[in-house]
Amino acid sequence: MNFWWIINLPFLLDALFASALGVLLFSRVKEPRTLWLLRGYLFLVSLAWFVQRFATLPVTSKLIDALVLACSLSLAILWQGELRRLMELLGTGRLAVLLGNTQKEFQANASTVTQLSEAAGILSQKRRGALIVLDMGSDLRPEDFLYSGVPIDAKFSSELLLNLFASDTPLHDGAVVIKGNRIISAGVILPLSRQSISRYGTRHLAALGITERFDRCICVVVSEETGTLSLANLGRLERPITSSRLLELLKEFMSSSPSAGIGKTSQSLNSLSLSSNKSSNHDPNEKRANLKTDIFPDQK
């Protein structure tokens, strides 16, 4: 019995590591279509391994290998953002983020959420351009931004947030990063998304860009042109929304676990995105504003 264990130990370790990797992948995938693609790809890989190991079918083996290679290239194109994020996490050693473990520092209380919604409503009424990033477990670091901005590390308050986005302050042009109940930095320059360049302005593209790369990250955007309030998550944008709707969405994020909350709220974003787009298309002022570039004041 001991001799059989020694002989099959590499096989058992191989099966164990492969199973652990499969569980990790399936636990991190939330979208049904992505899950279907992953299942199909893993089925092809398993079939290719089975044919090569237990069957003497050279032609079939070559065809399956070519199919696996073609699917790998296709998935690399479809999932280029996710693969880039995976390499970034592995390169920076942030395995806790990869495994989905969220520390207490990312948990905001009800007071912070309420003050954030109130401040966003005031900024929207005054038409002050604003970009607010909420880190809920992505563990954002300075190297994740084009420019890391100025460190603040202060307890969150609506008064401080309003002052940071005042038009006569030097930090109002960039984004404010919030982690838990603290404002981490201000004047941050985010990477831009390449989708809908002609439709959205710079702030909205920055919100889409950062949420495309980090799944446990949401952005609140206030348009300087129209005062429209928007919320970005997982590369999707819901606009326009009210401050009360923003408070409702933020409570959904904060009350649930990071992965479950994001998935649940992203479904509500998708269900409302069509109606939001229709309402914005019927508003001629909003349509004209979308065609303009919603850039920061010093870039005008």
Image: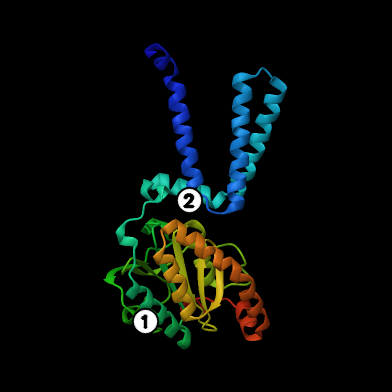
The number of numbered badges drawn on the structure is: 2
Residue 11 lies, in percent from the top left, at 47, 22
Q: Residue at x 62, y 67 (%)?
A: 196
Secondary structure under tag 2 reads helix
Snapshot quadrant of residue 147 = bottom left
198, above or below 289, in the image: above
Query: Is residue 238 among the parts visible in the rendering?
Result: yes
From the viewer's perspective, is 33 left or right of 124?
right
In the foreground, 285 or 143: 285
Secondary structure under tag 1 reads helix
**How crowded is the residue under tag 2: few (<14 C-alpha within 10 Å), some, or many (20+)?**
some
Residue 24 lies, in percent from the top left, at 46, 43
For residue 162, which numbered disc appears in the image? Answer: 1
Residue 187 lies, in percent from the top left, at 38, 71
Measured in 3D between alpha carbons, the distance from the residue under mark 1 to the one under mark 2, in whole angstroms, is: 32 Å
For residue 295, which numbered disc appears in the image? Answer: none
From the viewer's perspective, is 138 left or right of 288?
left
Snapshot quadrant of residue 123 = bottom left
**How crowded is the residue under tag 1: few (<14 C-alpha within 10 Å), some, or many (20+)?**
some
Say if mark 1 contacts mark 2, CB within 8 Å.
no
Please, what is the three-letter code of the amino acid marked with disc 2? Arg
In the foreground, 40 or 142: 40
Q: Residue at x 61, y 36 (%)?
A: 43
Q: Residue at x 59, y 52 (%)?
A: 32
For residue 85, which numbered disc appears in the image? Answer: 2
Snapshot quadrant of residue 47 = top right
